[in-house]
Amino acid sequence: MQLTNKVALITGAGSGIAKATAKLFAKEGAKIAALGHTKDELEATVAEINNNAGEAIPLVADISNPEQMQQATQAIIDKWGRLDIVFANAGINGVWASIEELTPEDWNKTISVNLTGTFLTVKYAVPYLKKQGGSVIITSSVNGTRIFSNTGATAYSSTKAAQVAFAKMVALELAKHRIRVNVICPGAIATSIDDNTDRQDLEEIQEPVEFPEGNIPLTDGKPGTSEQVAQLVFFLASDASSHITGTEVWIDGAESLLKA
């Protein structure tokens, strides 16, 4: 098993990409700290791992809260004494609205969760990653990196672009400590993230764009799966990517090339 005895912090682990990644990592020998804000979902993820001969613990925390994230990271160290992998996946789509209708409160919430949450997740992990080196993987998006036609997603896309800049800055800073920092940019993936998207009166401001039928060329329009993304995260967490850092990888079946 490629991740035997390694400890992984995975945020947003109650569902979707992070849950699939937690299960894959556990299968490959890692101990899993499953973090999120929904206790029932986290406990279900942890139970599934532990019932299949893995080892996992649930950590209920708000990634945008410094005290909670510091305490969660300490809980990992208290349990296992080390931290090797961080998958900073948790985030929200937030409010999608015109610049005139997007409120400062909506803007700040999206920035707080997606960008500040990423910062805090990595910040409190770094002292422990430095002890033996490790891997950080951050979930960005095709939005804000290749696609800018999703009208109204201004706050969301800004955070996704900023995550890439953050990763490149931190990758260079931490390279001497043998800590690699990379970014994944998923396109349409079958997850529940749309459940936390609040689209407000976008019809009047959207620019008309026409795409060929089946707008994900590789799969004839079908979205990717969480398991496919988990395989990419596993590669970036493993020694197979030992010379890769400061890099973003798009996983979207060429969707963003069509929509760029």
Image (spheres, helix red, strand yellow):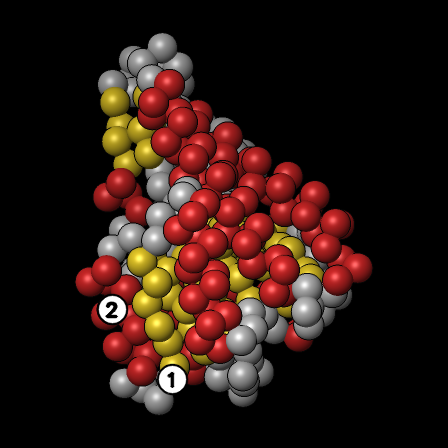
Q: Quadrant of residue 106?
A: top left
Q: Residues within 10 Å of mark 2 (few under 14, many from 20)?
A: many
Q: How many marks?
A: 2
Identify the residue at image location x=36%, y=10%: 100
Say which quadrant the C terminus sits in.
top right
Q: How many residues crowd around disc 1 within 10 Å: few (fewer than 14), some, or many (20 or more)? A: some
Q: Amino acid at mark 1?
A: Gly
Q: Which residue is mark 1?
A: 54
Q: Is residue 1 visible?
A: yes
- Give percent across and percent down for residue 27: 43, 82
Q: Amino acid at mark 2?
A: Glu
Quarter-of-image position of residue 174? bottom right
Q: Any mark on residue 108, and which?
A: none
Q: Secondary structure at mark 1?
A: loop
Residue at screen point 58% across, 70% down: 84
| Disc 2, SS | helix
Q: Measured from the top left, where is residue 89 in percent x and y? A: 44, 53
Q: Position of residue 158 (x, y in %)?
A: 50, 30
Residue 38 screen position, x and y as percent: 25, 55
Q: CA distance from mark 1 to mark 2?
A: 14 Å
Q: Looking at the rendered structure, which numbered label has been put on residue 43?
A: 2
- Closest to the observer: 176 or 223? 176
Q: Is residue 200 left or right of residue 222?
A: left
